[in-house]
Image (spheres, helix red, strand yellow):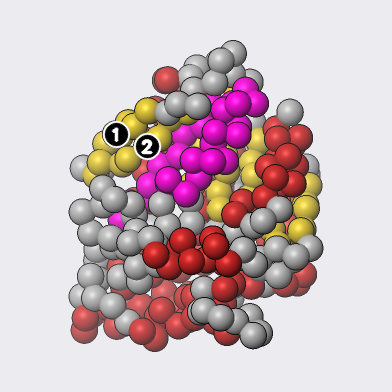
């Protein structure tokens, strides 16, 4: 399989994309990756979709990947997450120009699932299907976390760092795993995947305070059903997560995620929860089952 590297300019920032083109494509998937990782971690998944008739466009989030001018720093003073939304809209425009007249699918993993849901508050009619992987549950404390990051950034600057914010955002996930060998075991049961993440210089770099402001502002908005406007109520959703994924908030958290979408007016939700898997279901040992389920949904 082959892909090409492309750059898309968004708000004076160069976004790095990988574009996988399929013959006689049945659709195009726009992948929005998670926090503190990068697009190359999705090549295997993209190649699978490409081989099965789908174009795929996966990009590095602003502040992520080898081309980022400053790793894990997304926004400055405002920190409202708006740049992340604008970036994905520019990528969508690129996709629609590059691959016109084929259905567009939105795929968001983890933080990407937060970004995707906020995008859908205004743009759900642009997509034919949605897949949310490792989807983060709404959190009523996100407003407080945003305020705290704002206060700390006054003293440390938006580019500054805070261990308190690190612990609030992701530290809890490591502690949720009993008998853990590393603080990142919450990512997956697949120890090789966890070690690759640890060894990757473009993974796990702590967020700046400006980035945390962007993250928590998006998380706060994601949980508000009233913010979804002029929606495509028949838009098909597939929500996939590991049963032991601490990011999902357990069964209660998964139900909260579904409840917000239902209250927003979406009627076509399918949910698959995988036993014996954690957060990165695409990288678990039994990843092929997840791949096949997603393909079945797309087809």
Q: Quadrant of residue 113?
A: bottom right
Is residue 24 at least partly visible in the picture? Answer: yes
- Mark 2–mark 1 Cα distance, whole angstroms, equals 6 Å
Q: Tell me where residue 140 appears, x and y as whole percent.
A: 58, 75
Q: Nearer the viewer, residue 193 or 249?
A: 193
Sequence-first disc among 2 and 1: 1
Question: In front here: 160 or 78?
Answer: 160
Task: Please say if the residues under marks 2 and 1 sit with CB atoms less than 8 Å apart.
Answer: yes
Question: Which residue is at 54% across, 36% downward?
Answer: 46
Question: Quick one: label 1, few (<14), some, or many (20+) residues within 10 Å?
Answer: few
Q: Which SS class for mark 2?
A: strand
Q: Which residue shows up at 30% across the image and 34% down it? A: 8
- What residue do we see at 51% from left, 73% from top? 184
Count up the numbered dots: 2
The label on residue 104 is none
Q: Residue 7 has which mark?
A: 1
Depth check: 34 or 197 in front? 197
Circle 2 is placed at which residue position?
17
Q: How crowded is mark 2: few (under 14 residues within 10 Å), some or many (20 or more)?
A: many
Mark 1, secondary structure of its residue: strand
| Residue 75 visible here | no
Magenta segment: 39-63
From this view, report whether residue 199 is shown above or below residue 281.
Answer: below
């Amino acid at each position: 399989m082959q892909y090409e590297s492309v750059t898309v300019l968004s708000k004076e920032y160069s976004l790095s994309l990988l574009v996988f083109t399929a013959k006689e494509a049945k659709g195009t998937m726009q992948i929005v990756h998670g926090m503190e990782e990068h697009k190359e971690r999705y090549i295997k998944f993209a190649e699978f979709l490409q081989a099965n008739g789908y174009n795929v466009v996966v990009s590095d989030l602003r502040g992520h990947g080898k081309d980022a001018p400053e790793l894990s720093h997304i926004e400055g003073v405002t920190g409202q997450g708006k740049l992340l939304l604008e970036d994905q809209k520019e990528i969508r425009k690129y996709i629609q120009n590059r691959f016109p007249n084929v259905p567009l699918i939105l795929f968001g993993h983890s933080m990407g699932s937060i970004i995707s849901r906020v995008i859908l508050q205004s743009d759900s009619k642009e997509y034919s299907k949605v897949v949310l992987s490792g989807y983060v549950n709404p959190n009523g404390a996100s407003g407080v976390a945003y305020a705290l990051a704002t206060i700390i950034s006054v003293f440390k600057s938006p580019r500054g760092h805070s261990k308190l914010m690190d612990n609030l955002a992701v530290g809890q996930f490591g502690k949720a795993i009993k008998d853990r060998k590393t603080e990142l075991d919450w990512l997956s049961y697949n120890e090789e995947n966890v070690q690759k993440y640890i060894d990757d210089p473009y993974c796990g770099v702590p967020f700046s305070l400006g980035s945390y402001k962007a993250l928590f502002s998006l998380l706060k908005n994601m949980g508000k059903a009233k913010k979804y406007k002029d929606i495509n109520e028949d838009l098909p959703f597939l929500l996939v997560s590991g049963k032991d994924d601490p990011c999902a908030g357990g069964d209660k958290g998964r139900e909260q995620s579904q409840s917000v979408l239902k209250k927003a007016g979406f009627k076509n939700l399918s949910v698959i929860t995988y036993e014996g898997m954690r957060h990165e279901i695409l990288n678990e040992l039994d990843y092929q089952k997840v791949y096949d389920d997603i393909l079945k949904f797309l087809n």
